[in-house]
Amino acid sequence: MKARRLLILLVPMVFLFVLGVACDGEDPTAAPAPAQDMSAEEISSLVAAAVAAQAQPGASAEEIQAIVDAATAAAAESGVTGEELAMAIDNAVSDAVSQAVAATPAPTPTPFVAMEEKRKLTIALNNFASEEIAPHKAGTLSGIAHVANYADHLLGLTVDNQFTNQWGLSKSWEQIDGRTYDFTIKEGIKFHDGDDFTVEDAKGAIELLATEEAAGAFCLYCGTWIQILDSVDIVGPDKLRINLTRDEPFLYDILAPKAAADSYLASKRKWEEAGGNSQAWEDAGAPGTGPWDWVGRSLGTSNSFEKWDGYYSPAFKARFDEMEIILTVEDAPRVAQVRTGEVDLAVSSGAFVDEIRAAGLDVVGPKQGDTLYLNFYQSRDPAHCTNKLEVRKALNLAVDVQAVASALYAPGTYSLTASPFFTPYDEGFRPDLQPYGFDPEEAKRLIDEHCPNMEMTVYAFSFGVAPEMIDAQAAAVTYYRGIGIDAELVPIDWTAVQSLVRSDQPLSDQGVQNPSGVHVIPAARNFGEKIRTHGLWLAVGGSVDGIWSDKYIDLRLQYASDTNPVTRSALAQRVAKLMYDEYVNIPIAFRDVIYAGNPETVCGWTPLNGTQVALMFNTAEPCR
């Protein structure tokens, strides 16, 4: 019955995504009889027929349902696995949609449509970070206003973070063994400049991700690519083979934008033709393959895009004709911009939920998208007091997490958590581990005993997805001072902090004492990647540098290379308990990602990424 349940879930989603696609040729409404020996491919062809019938003029609901019922019954009786069926359905629907688009002549617009004003989507963010525009260098945080909208991934995701080929550059994929993966690249994909995207472009794009240039920029996952990529081979006219240096059961997780994975593909050929640097890439128009064509920008102010009519996935073409992403630093002005109609969507602090609703606006965005936490940079450096377990414990006990969370978020938009590294999404989740609690007297005693006259530098910055981060940092400083720590709040941009914590020179050598900051980790990212991106340091493929011991390097690699889900889960839970007992950081809240939405202009938005960063706005629905 597994295949039957899967089909029941997929068919309505397929119908929703391809609504409006018509197909010429044979009558798609004839319902074939189910057969017990039907293959996954044969069953999926029924779904493809239903897709075509959904928009076929004159097709009745009864005729469409007959096809769906036949496919459902066949799936239940055939014995094919859910994985086989899912891949076959994706392939059949992808082919059916492509053929329908190729066969259907462009409609002649009526005078009314021709005169209709173009629909523009305007989005306000609180931070543009580095504004790096090159896909293999930008990463998810620093490139949020650019790359996620015009670039692409090898694999796509559904709204619930399942892999799909309904968008993404691969038609199909297969794991040959633990170190070998094959990907069949779709035909007919175009760059925004009209050039063909080929399997050679896909090969070069993966190779760019594994360069020192990419790893040394803002790409979170390029450090992983350098560690695991052995080679990329072309093994057929449209087939790519990725060979790894070790078993990596989570390769798909970093190829798709799952949990903010940032393996954005930039053609190596086009990168080199443009001049091989970010400015040259911008001057060349940043040729991508995504649903939006990047038009231009004003640094520190705005970015402009147009709908890409040549996008290879009709189901995921942008719904708006134009899009502009603007920078508005403060919360209240962003909400005001939505209220006055200047902006359609605006990222917001959770504390503004009541104001958003009182203004008659919608509260939208991913649910339970990430975890907010306080991080101790370079605590592996013995010169920092945070290298000591007793000090990390004191810093946890010093902060009233419940008070901070309730001040930052509205009821129903967050929950307390014991660690940012394990949530209900993770193999490492331990419901028996609870928040540490608030005990300032014990915290002061520990500081006086293990680090008297302690100084601390707390960097105040926020990402373009979590404006409340600065408030959390300011609150932490207040609590630290309450137990006698000389804590200093230092306003700074994240890109500057990143350069500091990634430096080969320890911050203690630069006179920085016990550096700290507030971060968010995507909740759906797998346990091992959370440790890498938000724990390890640049030299070992990490990013944030917040774990105090080298032992986590080996533990993370052991987890990442274990292809047995039972033993991998057991290891994850053991490591979770270890991190908890060692007070690796200060968890604040497992939170929703809040956007204020204008109900008169945006009548629906399901962020495909499902996480807090690099959200895709092509699924925002304009009100008719």
Image (spheres, rainbow, N blue to C red):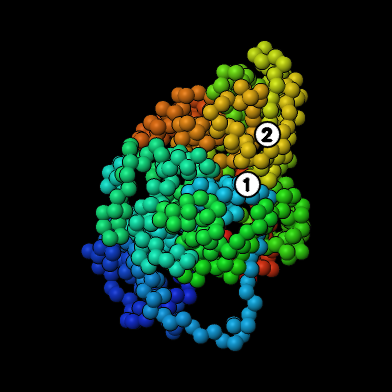
Q: Quadrant of residue 439?
A: top right
Q: Is residue 161 above or below residue 495?
A: below
Q: Residues within 10 Å of mark 1 (few under 14, many from 20)?
A: many
Q: Residues within 10 Å of mark 2 (few under 14, many from 20)?
A: many
Helix, strand or loop at mark 1? loop
Q: How many marks?
A: 2
Q: Residue at x 40, y 59 (%)?
A: 169
Q: Quadrant of residue 356?
A: bottom right
The reply to whether callout 1 and callout 2 are in contact (CB within 8 Å) is no
Q: Identify the disc placed on residue 247.
A: none
Left or right of 555? Residue 476 is right
Q: Residue at x 73, y 65 (%)?
A: 341
Amino acid under label 2? Tyr
Helix, strand or loop at mark 2? strand
Q: Would you say residue 63 is visible in this rendering?
A: no
Residue 117 horizontal/vertical position (percent): 65, 77
The residue indicated by pointer 2 is 459
Q: Nearer the viewer, residue 192 or 612?
A: 192
Q: Would you say residue 399 is visible in this rendering?
A: yes
Q: Residue at x 40, y 56 (%)?
A: 269
Q: Is residue 104 above or below residue 139?
A: below
Residue 390 horizontal/vertical position (percent): 61, 18
Residue 591 horizontal/vertical position (percent): 62, 44
Residue 406 horizontal/vertical position (percent): 71, 40
* Measured Cα–Cα span from mark 1 to mark 2: 15 Å
Left or right of 308? Residue 145 is right
Nearer mark to the viewer, of 1 and 2: 1
Q: Identify the disc placed on residue 129.
A: 1
Q: Residue at x 63, y 71 (%)?
A: 119
| Image quarter of the N terminus | bottom left
